[in-house]
Image (tube, rainbow, N blue to C red):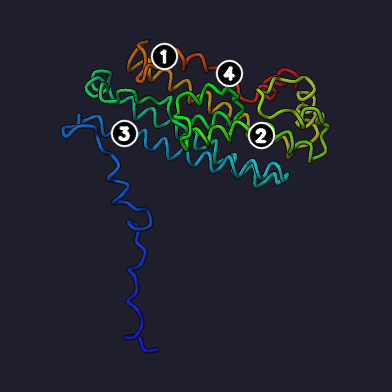
């Protein structure tokens, strides 16, 4: 076949086409024709959060599969990436805090019922990390994609369940009753599991590395929550948040609640 007989070649992939830059840059659309100067920053930061949440969910899916397969090094890679992303989320608060309360007040009313409490992806991350509270579904329309996805997540094992399966696969004496426990129920700290965790730290260096990565993630999440609380207090004080949420009051109630309590409980036994 002659070159002239072939169909015209499509344009080569470019940076812009691969990343769909024109579409991406068209998504920062304020509610009115005359946006306030700081509204663009607010939109970009929160859209970026959602992109990071998407990446976290992707990495948690990978790390859970690797834990279930007892592939320590692959699990460590994903868990380490999750830890680093959490640090990035914290750093983004620094950027958001360059906006003063007065600057935020110029467009806050445009958010109407919109609230960060409606972030389905962050709610899914909380569920993956062990939260078992069906009240989170109330923020999402029954039958919506978000509602279906969160409902499904509530039926799946948490990261901690995957970790217990990992420890059992490496020969640690995880009680079968715990391994086969109802994953839809909230996990409660367990003395027998703490004994297993302590043994893993003492006798299995590879498992100890995995457990420490989980501590990093737990600490990173708590750090992000703390910075988020202080940012909200700094911006709106103790007023109710947008959408009728309780604002800083709710966020403060989530502080210092580890998602992997057994990993913290053994600290005084080393």
Q: List the residue tagged with mark 3.
A: 43
Q: In which quadrant of the rendered image does the N terminus lie?
A: bottom left
Report which residue position mark 1 lands on.
Answer: 246
Q: Secondary structure at mark 3?
A: helix
Q: Quadrant of residue 151?
A: top right
The mark found on residue 257 in the picture is 4
Mark 1 surroundings within 10 Å by alpha-carbon count, few (fewer than 14), some (14 through 19), many (20 or more): some
Secondary structure found at label 1: loop
Query: Which mark is first along the chain, 1 or 2?
Result: 2
Mark 4 or 1, which is nearer the eye? Answer: 1
Q: Horizontally, is 26 left or right of 77 in the view?
A: left
Of the two numbered discs 2 and 4 on the same chain, state the one appearing first in sequence: 2
Percent of width and height locating residue 186: 65, 22
Q: CA distance from mark 1 to mark 3?
A: 21 Å
| Residue under the image location 47 percent in, 30 percent down | 142
Tell me if residue 54 comes above or below residue 179 in the rendering: below
Q: CA distance from mark 2 to mark 3?
A: 33 Å
Residue linked to disc 2: 157
């Amino acid at each position: 076949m002659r070159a002239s007989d072939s169909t015209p070649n499509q344009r080569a992939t470019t940076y812009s086409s691969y990343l769909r830059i024109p579409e991406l840059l068209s998504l920062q659309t304020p509610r009115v024709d005359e946006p306030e100067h700081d509204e663009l920053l607010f939109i970009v930061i929160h859209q970026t959060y959602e992109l990071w949440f998407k990446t976290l969910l992707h990495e948690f899916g990978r790390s859970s599969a690797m834990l279930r397969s007892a592939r320590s090094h692959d699990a460590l890679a994903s868990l380490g990436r999750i830890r680093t992303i959490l640090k990035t989320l914290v750093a983004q608060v620094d950027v958001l805090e360059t906006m003063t309360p007065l600057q935020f007040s110029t467009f806050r009313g445009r958010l109407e019922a919109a609230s960060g409490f409606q972030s389905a992806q962050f709610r899914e991350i909380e569920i993956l990390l062990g939260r078992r509270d069906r009240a989170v579904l109330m923020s999402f329309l029954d039958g919506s994609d978000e509602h279906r996805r969160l409902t499904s997540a509530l039926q799946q094992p948490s990261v901690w369940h995957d970790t217990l399966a990992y420890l059992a696969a490496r020969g640690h004496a995880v009680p079968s009753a715990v391994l086969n426990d109802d994953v839809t129920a909230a996990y409660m700290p367990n003395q027998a599991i703490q004994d297993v965790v302590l043994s893993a730290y003492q006798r299995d260096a590879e498992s100890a590395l995995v457990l420490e990565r989980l501590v990093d993630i737990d600490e990173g999440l708590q750090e992000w929550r703390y910075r988020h609380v202080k940012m909200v207090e700094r911006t709106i004080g103790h007023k109710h948040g947008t959408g009728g949420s309780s604002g800083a009051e709710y966020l403060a109630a989530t502080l210092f609640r580890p998602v992997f309590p057994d990993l913290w409980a053994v600290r005084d036994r080393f």
